[in-house]
Amino acid sequence: MSGHNKWSQIKRAKEVTDGAKSKVFGKFARLIALETKKAGGNPNSPGVRAVIERAKAENMPKENIERAIAKGSGAGAETLESVVYETYGPGGIAILIDALTDNRNRTAQEMKHLLSKNGCELAAPGSAAWAFTKSADGSYTPSSTIAVSGADEEQLMAILSQLDDQEDVQELYTNAE
């Protein structure tokens, strides 16, 4: 009867929570490195401060934040680019995928593969962005919404969860209700 003791149950629960934290911390580390690089290595710039405050709100450890700042301000820092991919999901739902990547070609191929598995494909730039307005903080809000129900809703949720599991994806925006 292996796997029935208390430690095994705790270990499995801890693996799930640690995996979720790792994913969130990784996204914030990449954002901090990008903002630090944009600020020329100045960790006191407003953009860097804002991202650090958001990371602290998610209980990101101080060591991880410092490591991300050092990564973004170092001479050998990897070049991270912010890329927005557009697609249409089930029921004509517009989806914007905001990604942060060090290799544009790899990320584009990953997105194409994932979307093709789910019956979608990447759209041309600007073809789905018309359904959103970009705010001052860089996020997108839908201009109009589309009601989704039944099988389309289930398929949309499956696509969004698979996209969210991708390492490079930072934010997902849809115009679904």
Image: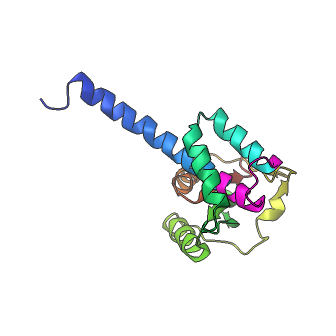
Which image quarter holds the C terminus?
top right
Q: Nearer the viewer, residue 142 or 21?
A: 21
Q: Report whether residue 27 is seen.
A: no
Q: Is residue 55 left or right of residue 49?
A: left
**In the displayed image of the protein, which residue is found farthest to the left?**
1
Give the total of numbered labels: 0
Q: Is residue 68 left or right of residue 96?
A: left
Q: Is residue 166 left or right of residue 84?
A: left
Please tell me whether residue 83 is drawn above or below residue 21 in the rendered image. Answer: below
**In the displayed image of the protein, which residue is found farthest to the top?**
6
The location of residue 124, given as percent across then percent down, is 72, 75
Q: Nearer the viewer, residue 53 or 157?
A: 53
Residue at (81, 59) in percent of width and height? 131
Residue 22 highlighted magenta (yes or no): no
Give the colour scheme shown: rainbow
Which contiguous range is marked in magenta? 32-46
The location of residue 55, given as percent across then percent down, is 65, 40
The location of residue 169, given as percent across then percent down, is 60, 57
The location of residue 29, given as percent across then percent down, is 60, 50
Residue at (38, 33) in percent of width and height? 14
Residue at (58, 52) in percent of width and height? 160
Which image quarter holds the N terminus?
top left
Residue at (33, 34) in percent of width and height? 12
Q: Report whether residue 99 is seen.
A: yes
Please tell me whether residue 70 is drawn above or below residue 11 in the rendered image. Answer: below
